[in-house]
Image (cartoon, helix red, strand yellow):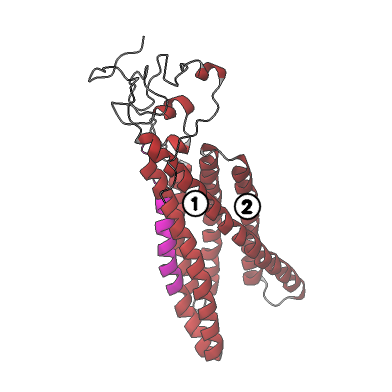
Amino acid sequence: MNPPPVVPTLRPLSTSASAKLDAAGNVAADVACRRCGYNLRTLPSVGKCPECGTAVGRSLHGDLLQYSDPEWVEKLASGMNWIIASVAIGIFTGMLIEAVSMMVGGTGGAKFSTIAVPLMQLSLGAVGLVGYWMFTTPDPGNVEPEKPTSVRRVVRGTTVFGYLASPIAQALVVTAPLFAAGISVFCALVGIVGIFAIFMYAIALADRIPDVLLARTCRTVMWGIAAVMVGGIVTVVLTSISPGGPAPTGLIMFTGCFVGLGSLVFGIWAVILVIRFRKAMIEAARTARVTWAAPQGPAVVQMPARPRPLT
């Protein structure tokens, strides 16, 4: 049995925006297409611009995902699949490496971990890198030039840096522990910037769904993960500077417990958040595909080949 057709759900408009539509839902005023400037008068609100193919709803409703390019939204959802896969495989692989290290035991187990962990970070990091790269694909519907310091570009830059630097730090733990600790601290600092960037990017997408609760949850998880990363930096610094001392040992145990428990709680919460995002993106893409593929409709009159100037 075929599923029922998807009907685009129009979000409530302001009074001024609603006045631009007639009783049949067609544009009854001069409204410029936000991408090419075409005059959208007489077009159905669920149709698309005949010049550039952009959904009319995007010029009326703003940047809601249900009026964005459906292939772009679907690519964001696909990126989340890669991110979830990297987390799941990472948990399984980490448990496997730990089990093998315990079975080998002694110096052999330590050497195995020193080799296996960087290799795991490189392989799984590649999966996560692909996911974040897809999740931060530029919006083809943007009409304004993107700044070099945009959160989307910051996410990509910090993700690539973390992918390259973390395995190096892990490989130097035995041969150059202080140098490795320094690299780890710097990676953590860059990671904190990346965490804020990815969550700010996600919050902006949640606002475009729109989902107020999802955006609020993103902020909570963002601050929680940032606190855990700060705790990790403190633990690394204390361990490197004053190992074995009675007072630092107690503090190290406290920060270590905080980092461990926080990583578990906010890690699970982040995975749930990604799954919720993926579901929302798929639904938005499904609706957007219907909107972008909508016919011009009988209300469309003969249009000139070039954009008409607004009067």
Classify residue 87 as left or right of residue 224.
left
Q: Indicate the quadrant containing the C terminus: top left, top right, bottom left or bottom right.
A: top left
Q: Residue at x 40, y 18 (%)?
A: 31
Q: Nearer the viewer, residue 96 or 283?
A: 283
The numbered dot on residue 227 is none
Task: Residue 236 in the image: state x and y as whole percent.
Answer: 62, 67
Q: Is residue 54 left or right of residue 162?
A: left
Q: Residues within 10 Å of mark 1 (few under 14, many from 20)?
A: many
Is residue 127 shown in magenta?
A: yes
Gap between marks 2 and 1 measured at Cα: 17 Å
**Magenta stretch encompasses residue 188:** no
Q: Residue at x 58, y 40 (%)?
A: 211
Amino acid residing under circle 2:
Val
Badge number at residue 278: 1
| Label drawn at residue 221 | 2
Q: Amino acid at mark 1?
A: Arg
Q: Residue 123: where, in percent of width, then height?
A: 41, 69
Q: What span is in magenta?
A: 119-141
Q: Label 2's element?
A: helix
- Say how many tags the image has: 2
Query: Which secondary structure lies at badge 1?
Result: helix
Q: Position of residue 102 (x, y in %)?
A: 56, 87
As drawn, 151 above or below 305: below
Outermost residue, left direction?
305
Viewed as shown, does residue 103 lie left or right of 7? right
Residue 98 visible in the snapshot: yes
Are circles 2 and 1 on residues that touch, CB within 8 Å? no
